[in-house]
Image (spheres, rainbow, N blue to C red):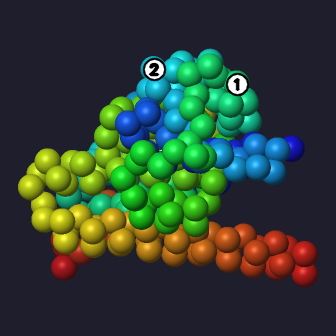
Amino acid sequence: MKVPRLSETEILIASAISGKELYGLQIVDEVLALTRGKRRISLGGLYTTLHRMESKKLVTSRWGETVDDRQGARRRYYKIAGLGARALSETELVLGPALRLAHGMAGGR
Amino acid sequence: MKSEFIVLGEGAYGVVLHVKHASRRYHVAVPSRAWNRIKHDHRSREDIVIAVLASPHARHLADIELAVYPDWLNTAAFFVPKTIREPWLGDLREDRKRMVAAGCSRRTILWATLTQIVLLLLHAAHHTLLRIICAVTRHAG
């Protein structure tokens, strides 16, 4: 199966949920922590992206529990799927050396 | 026959739902424990609606004044795509509670909520547009 390319938001979300199962607000917090406060994803952007990623089979989800603060609405937990993990490692393989090289060149000037 | 529900909030009678079943709409209240049990036992929304309407604990609110606080978020939720409505709305409510706990002013919370709604609608419109363009260009190519 062809591994799809990931957008920036998809990379951030996939990184946040790799190895963990998180629900929406936890993913937003995790992305904020991963980027040291530089990227805050809106809930709308998060869920539309997650929905798209799920249709591309990059993530899987399950319904969770509800708490009082949610007034009956259940949480939905997401975790990275095999294809998503592959897409993330491929992105790292392609972008990692390129970014390091660019960083080195910028530092050498 | 398509059955659907939306959680309106929690009131004096328990969790209040707006339920659509067999082309009819109802406001039904279910005690929280019964609601949690129904959701645990039934996974599809269709089954949940049928179980709610059949539950001996369910109470039809058609002739009773709706026992929930008027919540404009519920009205806004009808415009949110069904696929992401429940988790998005729940997270938004949880986030609002967090902001209240953090001491944010009512105006700040209102603006933050409005921004989230606008961003969601823009994202949804953007994705729909992209999907249409992709389908058209693929068809043309």
Camera-nearest residue between B6 and A36: B6
- Residue closer to the observer: B94 or B20: B20
Q: Residues within 10 Å of mark 2 (few under 14, many from 20)?
A: few
Q: Position of residue A30 (x, y in %)?
A: 30, 45
Residue extending furthest toward the right:
B140
Q: Is residue B117 above or below residue A91?
A: below
Q: Residue B54 has which mark?
A: 1
Assign the N terminus of chain A to one quadrant of the image.
top right
Is label 1 in a helix, a strand or a loop?
Answer: helix
Amino acid type of the residue that numbered disc 1 sits on in the rendered structure: Ala
Q: Amino acid at mark 2?
A: Arg
Query: Picture coordinates of residue B78 (x, y %)?
Result: 58, 62
Q: Residue at x 19, y 71 (%)?
A: B107
| Chain letter of disc 2 in the image | B
Q: Nearer the viewer, residue B54 or B138?
A: B54
Residue furthest front in the image: B63
Q: Earlier in the sequence, mark 1 or mark 2?
A: 2
Residue B33 — which label?
2
Image position of B69 (left or right of B131): left
